[in-house]
Image (tube, helix red, strand yellow):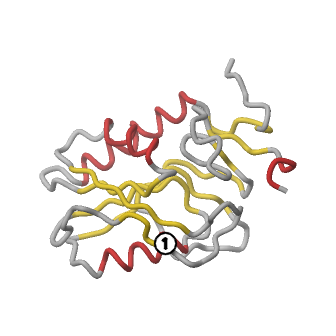
Amino acid sequence: MQTIHPDVERILIGEDEIREICARLGKEISADYAGKNPLLVAVLRGAVVFTADLMRSISCPMSIDFMATSSYGSGTTSSGTVRILKDLETNIRDRHVIIAEDILDSGLTLSNLIEMLGSRGPASIEVCAFAVKDIAGYTPPVTPKYVGCHVPNEFVVGYGLDYAERYRNLPYVGVLKPEIYS
């Protein structure tokens, strides 16, 4: 039985399911990018845990780089303003780029990131999202090619996902108790 953090209401995605998701996504990416040496771009900080697991599941030659963006601060909803805090070190012209994202909710940050990276002349840009948040009546501006799972429109933490820089180290994805962030 998984030990649950006292601030977490319930576990949505356990460790075994996370491993299965990463293995499946790695297989899909390996098949799609055989012979193409894609660049996997981890969006820091949230996607670092997912990216580490994902890249170990990819069997084709690949490279990795990191970007850091900010649109949340310490709040619970995106501000809509995206700031680049750390840019890529790799020249992506004519490269196949796969953005590894922890969770797609509003899609605002990711949409701006894709537009910015697209201006640098990559061969292609795709998104691999560990989770997509299902928000009733809302369609995000980005549709990931690779989706690990869907989660309900609740505040989720763990496996890289945080609230005010806490809970990223939980080995599962869980729903944060509302009294913690309200």
Point out the residue furthest to the left here. Answer: 35
**Vertical order, 50 against 144 (above or below):** above
**Vertical order, 20 against 123 (above or below):** above
Point out the residue furthest to the top here. Answer: 1
Indicate left or right for 139 with 89 as reference.
right
Name the amino acid type tagged 1: Val
Point out the residue furthest to the front here. Answer: 85
Marks counted in the figure total: 1
Point 55% across, 74% down: residue: 108
Residue nearest the observer in this picture, 71 or 27: 71
- Residue 82 pos. (x, y %): 51, 75
Point 28% across, 82% down: residue: 119
- Residue 36 pos. (x, y %): 15, 56
Label 1 element class: loop
**Vertical order, 44 against 57 (above or below):** below
Residue beneath disc 1: 142
- Residue 141 pos. (x, y %): 53, 76
Residue 23 position by quadrant: top left
- Residue 144 pos. (x, y %): 45, 63
Q: Quadrant of the C terminus?
A: bottom right
Point 30% across, 54% down: residue: 40
Indicate left or right for 96 with 12 as reference.
left
Residue 54 position by quadrant: top left
Residue nearest the observer in this picture, 147 or 76: 76
Point 64% across, 41% down: residue: 167
Q: Quadrant of the N terminus?
A: top right
How many residues crowd around disc 1 within 10 Å: few (fewer than 14), some, or many (20 or more)? some
